[in-house]
Amino acid sequence: MNVERRPAVYGLMAEFADPDGLIRAIRESRQAGYRRLEAYTPYPIEQVSEALALPRSKMPLLVLAGGLIGLAGGYYLQYWVNLIAYPMNVGGRPMHSWPAFIVPTFEMTILCAALFAVLGMFALNGLPQPYHPVFNVPRFAAASRDRFFLLIEAADPRFDRSATAEFLRRLDAREVAQVDD
């Protein structure tokens, strides 16, 4: 018996012609109680982030942690090598010559901070992600050129397929499409 399963609904996506319509739609959606929203634009728009009420990024904290780990690790490595593992008195200088440790410690701080930034960006953005359900919407290809999209996820507590579709149409969306999972 061949039973065809209907794809699960990931959400509903509305297309807008300009950023002002998108920002207005985001604000009205938040006022209506929708919280699981995502916006897609061809270029960064600061008002979209504000309207979505996105939380502050954890990246500065990750980069700081990476820098501190690099600072401590770089300094300790030189301390351990010069005082514990291979103590050699060269030229009568003190064994713990901290001025000589400054440049390598600085370089290690920068290296670890940069590594934490790159790896943190991948982790916080959920990358690599070769597939996302929004790619199932044919008109979504225009998001990288000149269209603006608002997605209300089905995981939102207020999501009701027909009521949410009608709500998005009232926001002057050019088109409302179902996003299948």
Image: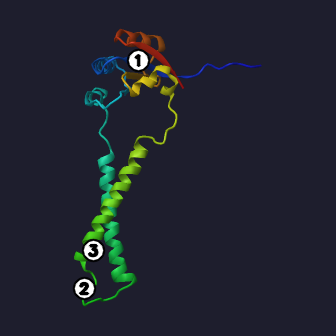
Rounded to the nearest angstrom, the CA distance separating label 1 from label 2 is 69 Å
Image: 63 above or below 178: below
Q: Is residue 30 left or right of residue 165?
A: left
Q: Residue at x 34, y 20 (%)?
A: 33
In terms of secondary structure, where does tag 3 sit?
Answer: helix
Image: 168 above or below 119: above
Q: Residue at x 30, y 17 (%)?
A: 21
Residue carrying label 2: 94
Position of the C terminus, as image quadrant, is top right
Residue 4 visible in rendering: yes
Q: x and y percent of residue 92 in the render?
A: 24, 90
| Amino acid type of the residue that numbered disc 2 sits on in the rendered structure | Pro
Q: Residue at x 33, y 72 (%)?
A: 76
| Amino acid type of the residue that numbered disc 3 sits on in the rendered structure | Phe
Who is closer to the viewer here, 5 or 89? 89
Q: Quadrant of residue 47?
A: top left
Q: Quadrant of residue 164?
A: top left
In terms of secondary structure, where does tag 1 sit?
Answer: strand
Q: x and y percent of residue 115 in the render?
A: 38, 55
**Residue at far left of view:** 99
**Number of numbered discs:** 3
Question: Callout 2: 10 Å neighbours few (<14), some, many (20+)?
Answer: few
Rounded to the nearest angstrom, the CA distance separating label 2 from label 3 is 12 Å
Residue carrying label 1: 14
Q: Earlier in the sequence, mark 1 or mark 2?
A: 1
Q: Earlier in the sequence, mark 2 or mark 3?
A: 2
